């Protein structure tokens, strides 16, 4: 077989030829440095595969290079460990947002303060009046008198404590209530005056007793 | 003067317990406002319940001070404060509960001056044994409070040891003679039963929210 009869594939258009020039585009037959002078069909198919690979190569770019890198979120320390140590109710929570002091809150605070004032001053006063009237008009030994004495005595001692509790509740739950603040200072002043009065009375009684005993009575 | 000294020592015992509880509370990060209102309320709660117990128990005929009434008032005050303030509730509860044995120990000194709560155990006055026992209970509970993260353990220890000591030592008081079990021991059993029930049912009891306002 003569060299000119060997088939060759044109590099420019891929046409299979057997002459010295491409019958499609007219490109000259390339001189084969390896000695065969032509691109074999296998080499042509490899060239075609290489050309085909170039197209999907663009789409084969890993997504990591296109997508933005995934950012890792920093996890908060687990609460379970703190709960296990018994600090469930002491673990710092998010900072409490202060509620606005609305008219409904003010109304509720005012009602609680009024009830507290009634329990502190008015109810014990009423109980004392009833006791005086009872002792005036009812026999001391009667069962009604004794039961009433116990009930009124209990109310007189517990109602100031309830009153203090209500005042503290108003100061904690409705700290912006002016009535609550005034009530707090009123009760503190009342307690201070009461303590001073008790000390003065005890000291006066002790002084008078000592004076009497020294005088020989 | 005997009455005045008794009253003064009782007052000192309440103040000492208040100071001790507040020092522990400050150390745990409880707000000063919470400590002030708690101390204010508990002081009056102790005094009022202590006086009212004697008043009601005597049918309205006597006025005095009862240790059990004071403890009852203390518990009422602590529970109220824990639920109202919602500020480190466990630490607030435990700091006051473990201060109770300290208050009771100092109050026994008042009993020595007044001559009440008399009795003997192996030739030693029950009042002295009471005073030393409750001081030891306080020291043990305080040590647990400081060393342990779970402050409630110190509160449980103080309560259990106090109940047991009070119940056992009551057998050696003069007021117990001629009786199998005294009325005060019955009250201790009732109080212990309530405390035990509260412990068993603690998961069902609605606890205050932890409102740590920083």
Image: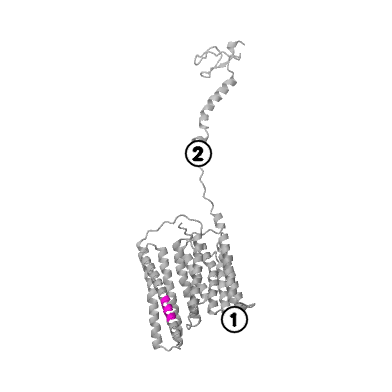
What stretch of residues is rendered in magenta? Answer: A198-207
**Residue B24 located within the stretch drawn in magenta:** no
Inspect this view and state whether residue B160 appears: no
Q: Position of residue B59 (x, y in %)?
A: 49, 83
Relative to B53, A104 lies left or right: left
Residue A18 vertical placement versus A77 (above, below): above
Residue nearest the observer in this picture, B35 or A9: B35
Q: Residue at x 40, y 85 (%)?
A: A134
The secondary structure type at the circle numbered 2 is loop
Residue A176 vertical placement versus B123 (above, below): above
**Residue A204 located within the stretch drawn in magenta:** yes
Tag shown at residue A23 = none
Tell me the residue that label 1 is attached to. Answer: B174
- The residue positioned farthest toward the right in the image shown: B122
Tell me the residue that label 2 is attached to. Answer: A69
**C-alpha gap between disc 2 and disc 1:** 84 Å
Residue A88 vertical placement versus A168 (above, below): above
Residue nearest the observer in this picture, A181 or A81: A181
């Amino acid at each position: 077989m003569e060299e000119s009869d060997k088939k060759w594939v044109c590099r420019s258009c891929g046409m299979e030829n057997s002459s010295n020039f491409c019958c499609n585009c007219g490109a000259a037959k390339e001189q084969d440095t390896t000695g065969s002078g032509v691109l074999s069909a296998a080499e042509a198919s490899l060239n075609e595969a290489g050309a085909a690979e170039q197209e999907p190569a663009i789409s084969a770019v890993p997504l990591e290079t296109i997508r933005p890198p995934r950012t890792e979120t920093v996890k908060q320390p687990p609460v379970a460990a703190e709960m296990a140590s018994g600090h469930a109710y002491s673990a710092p929570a998010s900072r409490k947002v202060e509620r606005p002091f609305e008219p409904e809150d003010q109304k509720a605070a005012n009602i609680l303060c009024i009830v507290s004032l009634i329990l502190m001053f008015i109810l014990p006063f009423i109980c004392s009046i009833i006791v005086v009237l009872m002792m005036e008009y009812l026999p001391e030994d009667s069962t009604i008198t004794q039961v009433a004495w116990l009930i009124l005595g209990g109310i007189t001692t517990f109602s100031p404590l309830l009153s203090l509790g209500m005042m503290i509740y108003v100061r904690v739950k409705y700290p912006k209530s002016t009535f609550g603040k005034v009530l707090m200072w009123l009760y503190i002043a009342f307690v201070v005056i009461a303590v001073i009065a008790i000390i003065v009375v005890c000291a006066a009684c002790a002084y008078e007793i000592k004076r009497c005993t020294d005088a020989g009575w | 003067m005997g009455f005045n000294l008794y009253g003064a020592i009782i007052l000192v015992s309440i103040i000492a317990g208040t100071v001790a509880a507040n020092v522990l509370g400050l150390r745990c990060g409880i707000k000063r406002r919470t400590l002030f209102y708690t101390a204010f309320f508990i002081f009056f709660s102790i005094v009022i319940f202590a006086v009212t117990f004697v008043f009601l128990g005597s049918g309205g005929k006597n006025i005095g001070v009862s240790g059990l009434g004071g403890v009852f008032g203390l518990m009422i005050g602590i529970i109220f404060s824990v639920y109202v303030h919602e500020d480190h509730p466990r630490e607030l509860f435990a700091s006051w509960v473990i201060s109770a044995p300290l208050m009771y120990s100092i109050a026994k000194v008042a009993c020595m001056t007044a001559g009440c709560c008399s009795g003997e155990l192996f030739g030693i006055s029950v009042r002295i044994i009471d005073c030393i026992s409750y001081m030891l209970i306080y020291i043990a509970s305080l040590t647990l409070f400081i060393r342990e993260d779970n402050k409630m353990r110190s509160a449980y220890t103080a309560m259990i040891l106090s109940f047991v000591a009070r119940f056992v030592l009551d057998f050696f008081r003069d007021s117990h003679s001629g009786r199998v079990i005294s009325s005060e021991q019955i009250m201790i059993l009732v109080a212990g039963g309530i405390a035990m029930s509260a412990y068993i049912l603690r998961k069902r009891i609605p606890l205050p929210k932890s409102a740590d306002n920083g």
